[in-house]
Amino acid sequence: MAYKEYTPKDYSQLKGLVGITDEQILAHLDLYKGYVRRVNSMLKTLQELDPGSQAWQEERRRLGWEFNGMRLHEVYFDQLMKGSGGASGKQKITSVLSPVFKNFDEWVKELKSAAVIPGIGWVAGYLDKLTGQMITVWVNEHDQGHLAGLQLVFILDVFEHAYGRYLPFTERKKYVEDYFENVNWDIVAQRLG
């Protein structure tokens, strides 16, 4: 058995975003590519190690962090475009927001409010297909805090690397506002299924 190798996605179109510099995106993409490299390395190593050995256990334990770091960044970058877009996507999203949210803007307000909670992590918007409701979650670590069985619809990276390592924490609110100016809501809506 051999795992298929993952290839970093091409996000070269993410230039000239509103409020998010090309330098921020390039640094963030370097981090993402590191996750892809580590996932590939770990999957190869896991095939070579004796299952159950201490080294195998440690690689297996760490794989969730690295894999989710890769995949969450892909979801994050996939939903970006130069300038906000996706009027039809907003309509599709709005159709699943009630009864929890009155409208699309109320849901976005909740996402933004969650994104400025002190700490580092991710803000995730999930659709619970069993109840048909959207749930906003703070995810502290890549591999912890996700809601099992729910469809990830929206993700926002609020680790320091996303909004600039050298910017003060007070700039995170500006980053959050800028990020939402670049969301392609049609892509987000496609995740509803």
Image: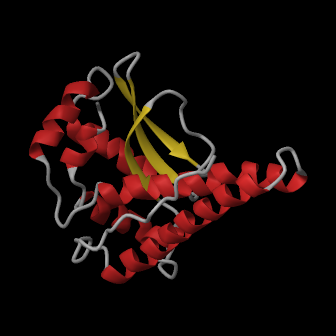
Residue found at the far top of this picture:
131
Quadrant position of the C terminus in the picture: top left
Q: Is residue 136 visible?
A: yes
Residue 75 image offset from top left, x and y in percent: 38, 52
At x 31%, y 79%, the residue is: 21
The answer to which quarter of the image holds residue 19 is: bottom left
Q: Against 13, is 45 above or below? A: above
Q: Against 155, is 172 above or below? A: below
Left or right, 55 with reference to 130: right
Residue found at the far right of this picture:
54
How was the colour assigned to the protein in this rendering?
Answer: secondary structure
Left or right, 145 with reference to 151: right
Residue 138 image offset from top left, x and y in percent: 52, 44
Q: Is residue 170 visible?
A: no
At x 16%, y 64%, the residue is: 83
Left or right, 109 with reference to 6: left
Image mark count: 0
At x 85%, y 56%, the residue is: 55
Residue 180 image offset from top left, x and y in percent: 27, 57
At x 48%, y 76%, the residue is: 30
Q: Nearer the viewer, residue 155 or 163?
A: 155
Q: Against 43, is 92 above or below? A: above
Residue found at the far front of this picture:
1
The answer to which quarter of the image holds residue 45 is: bottom right
